[in-house]
Image (spheres, rainbow, N blue to C red):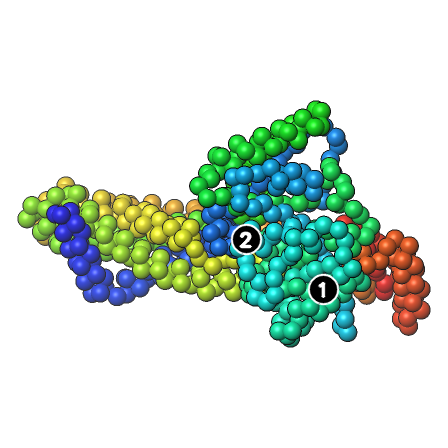
Amino acid sequence: MRVLGNLWGDVRYGLRTLRLSPGFAAAAIVAIAVGIGINSGIFSVLNGLVLRDLPAPDAQQLVGVSQHVEGGAERSSHGAPSMFSAAEYERFRAGTQTLSGLLAFARPTPVTLGGAAPQQIPGSLVSCNYFDVLLQKPALGRGFAADACGAQQTAPEVVLGHDLWVSAFAADPGVVGRVVVLNRQSFAVVGVAPEGFEGVDIARASFFVPLSAQKLLLPSVDYLRDDHLSWLIVVGRRGAGASVEEVRAELAVIAARIDRDEPGRKTALVIERATPFPYPELRPYVLGAGAVVMAAFALVLLIACANVANLLLARASTRGREIALRLALGATRGRLVQQLLTESVLISLAGGALGSLLALWSFRSLVAFVLTGLPADAPPMQLDSRPDLTVLAFAVGLTFVTGIAFGLAPAIHASNPALYGAIKMDASAERAKRSRGVLVGLQVAVCLVLTVCASLLLRGLYTTQTVETGFNYRDVAVASFNLEGAGYDAPKADAFQRALLERVHALPGVTAAAQASTMFGTIKYWQ
């Protein structure tokens, strides 16, 4: 109780002293706000990318399932090697008892939505229990019927995303039951996804169709019949009372049965908390890149701490008489350090609150701006950078660590009893001068490191933009398109490309035209 009473007294005294020094308080709070705000904002982006729970009720019960397969038949992948084939998913789904549901979905793929104004939109192939396992109740209609993933139907089912329903169908409440055309195939609308739900992958999905419709949307390939193709991401919901260890043990038994059916095969499963970034092969690289960025902005916070520590040292020289009187009246050094550290933490708390508010406002706008500025052929992304408990814990912890970091050295220096032999003399001036010199040197060193790194990045960007390509690319126009996403098979695509080149050649002012195939599709060039 005495410790708590002392702490409350220190808080009140610290608030009074800061109120009497508004210039010092404002300078210190703004410096800390910039450092904490930037670091909290960067962490919120990293959290939204690889650490946040999936956008679903009771998300802590969801687990991501991935695998590492060695030996056996040769495998191929449409996505990542850790994904599952349709046959593997079915065996895990049929054999599990610890999971109340096991869903599967494929990476969103570009598809052409027919109509008066055709447009390319991303859609996801999902298992029929997709919305049931995620506990996502459609805003209109229903999810998929149990038989929708069985035999092909005349008009397969589709669940529209809420944004697509608003933008392409004017939020028509009678859209359920209508037929829409996707890649020149008819689909019956059975529901509209809830507002804000665009799938659980980092790539955004504008509609959802059953896995059985894969051949309709992508007629040139047949993923469902390939038992050695990794293309499905699997997520499960733990049953009542089932622990992650029990899920891991049960699924390992099912994996062993699959291995026995395929001589030489050995499967290692990874069961972990489900996140919006379901690619375990890439997660270390994303976290590594995030750590590098966080380290760079931690240097900005270090500069701010050195700045405020310098201010505290300068302020301590004006409080020499006060501290000497406290020592003469019997105050212990520990008691003085506690009081001075309380003032530092108060400054850090105010700066952390201000910086977090700035980060909440600025980084959400910045993320939205960056996502809208992605190249046209890049898949639409969704990134939820809103603060959650993880971001809040990070900001609070960083605030307290920052307060102690910039306040500890000045507090120890100012409370040294050997420096106050006489009340009228400030014997600490020379030592304070040396301490401030060290902090200034630290600031200069960190600023130099940041300046050199920024200069190298700018030089690399300039070199990339001005590199000599070996050919003249002036007066060149580029058009890209995805014929497979528009429902063209190989013969029709060849005929389309030949006709397009002939017509482009005939345009006035065009001197040459050529085509090139890239990993993103077929690209046409003309000048």
Q: Residue furthest front?
A: 147
- Determine which residue is flagged by label 2: 134
Q: Quadrant of residue 131?
A: bottom right
Q: Is residue 54 left or right of residue 463?
A: left
Q: Is residue 215 left or right of residue 197?
A: right
Q: Quadrant of the C terminus?
A: bottom right
Mark 1 vs mark 2, CA separation in Å = 22 Å
Which residue corresponds to mark 1? Answer: 188
Residue 136, percent across and down?
A: 54, 58
Residue type pointed to by label 1: Ala
- Left or right of 419? Residue 357 is right
Amino acid of disc 2: Leu
Q: Name the one closer to the observer, 512 or 283.
A: 283
Question: Residue visible at 59% across and 67% down?
Answer: 140
State whether residue 426 appears in this view. Answer: no
Specify few, some or many for label 1: CA neighbours under 10 Å numbering under 14, 14-19, or 20 or more: some
Tell which of 406 and 234 is nearer to you.
Answer: 234
> Measured from the top left, where is residue 381 in percent x and y?
61, 57
Residue at 14% across, 51% down: 5
Q: Give the mark toward the camera: 1 or 2.
A: 1
Q: Residue at x 71, y 24 (%)?
A: 263
